[in-house]
Structure formats: structure tokens, C-alpha cells
Amino acid sequence: MTSLTVLDYNSILTGIIAIAGLPTAWNIIARNEYRHHTIEKILKGKKRGAYLLATAIFIASLLRDFAFKVAVQDNPSLLMSMISASFSADLNILQTLLQMLGVLLLIIGNILVVSSFCRLGITGTYLGDYFGIKMKKRVTAFPFSHFESPMYLGSTLSFLGTAFLYRSEVGVLLAVWVGIVYYVATVYFESPFTAMIYSENKKAYRKLTNMHTLKNNS
């Protein structure tokens, strides 16, 4: 029977840190940019700064995905080994079902991610509003018509699908960790801060409109 000693704890820990570290880093950088315009000042432009951050997040996401895949590949399926050793069961049917479920989750996840990106664009996806590049109006078309954070949901489902394809319990746990990290990042950090940004923008617009009205009436 496979024991816990066969687990590659280094790859698991790397995956845990990479998954939590990426949104933590981009939220810190984006908030600093909103308050101090550090990247904008260095590159002398909002769009340049936004595209640089987008590129950095994209590359870091690939590295995180790689860390996740390594953790999944380096850790065997404990449950499969236990079932096989204990009951001498033919696992072909179970493996096929898990693979089918994994493919389905990957398809759904990628549809949500790609459709979200198409609706938001580069700056809408990668925190362009923290640079002052704001969306003209709230996106309400699919997938935003059905999900609050479809890109994060799609990403989580894709991780889960990969875990099922590799029949990895470690992968499933890491995918759950992805969902938790995204939930915390969205509910407690990104959504409130983004709402504040657009609220301040509306206040500034009203103030400017009132000034023009007073000027025209005087």
C-alpha cells in the first residue's frame, strides 16, 4: 500500500506558495500603482504600465501552472493504489470516468476563461483600472451574466480538470486551494477596492459636472 512518505512535499509546497503568492503579488503591485503611479512614472504612460503588468501576470501565471503540474505529476494517486492493493480491482472504468470528467471540466473552465478575456480585453482582465484605464460600463454579457467572477471560476475548474486527468488527490487539494485563494482575493480585496475606484470616479465626474453647471449659470 502506498504511504504518505512517497509524497513529494517540496513540489506540493512550491505549488501552494505559487498559487497563493501570485494574486497576493499582483494585488499589492496594483494597489501601489493606483496610489503612487510607480510603474506609470517609470514607463511614462498608463497603457505601457498596464501592459507591462499584464505581461508579468501572464508569465507568472504560466510559472504557477507549471508548479501545479509538477506537483500533480510528482505525486502518485494514493487512492488508486490503495484500491488496487486492497481489492485487486480493475480500475479501467474508474480511470476512464475520471478522465472524462477532467476533460469536461477543462472544456468548461477554458470556455469561461476565454469568453471572460474576450469581454474584458487585456486591460480589463489585468487590472487596467488600477492604472486609470477604466471600463466604460459594467460587462453584463455571458459569462458575466451568469457568474460573478467567471475567469477565476474557469481557472479553478481547469486546475480541477487537470487533477482528474492525472488522477491526483494532491492536484484536487491544490485545485481547492486555488478556489479558496481566488475567493479570498475577490471578496476581501479586489472587489471592494475596484468598487472604491469606480465610486471615486463617479464622485469626481459629478463634481466636475457641478462645476461646469455653476460656471454656465454664472
Image (cartoon, rainbow, N blue to C red):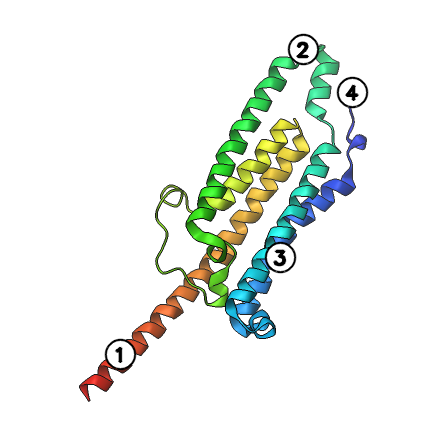
Mark 4 lies on residue: 1
Extreme residue toward the right, this view: 5
Q: Of the residues tagged 2 and 4, which is closer to the observer?
A: 2
The earlier-in-sequence mark between 3 and 1 is 3
Is residue 163 among the parts visible in the rendering?
yes
Is label 2 in a helix, a strand or a loop? loop
Residue type of the residue flagged with mark 4: Met
Q: Of the residues tagged 3 and 1, which is closer to the observer?
A: 3
Is label 4 in a helix, a strand or a loop? loop
Closer to us: 30 or 193: 30
Residues packed near mark 2 inside 10 Å, few (<14), some (14 to 19) or many (20 plus):
few
| Residue at the (55%, 27%) spot, across then down | 103
Mark 1 lies on residue: 210
Left or right: 193 in relation to 158: left
Asked if 119 appears above or below 215 in the picture, the reply is: above
Q: What mark, if any, has residue 56 been given in the picture? A: 3
Closer to us: 114 or 34: 114
Image quarter where the N terminus lies is: top right
Mark 2 lies on residue: 90
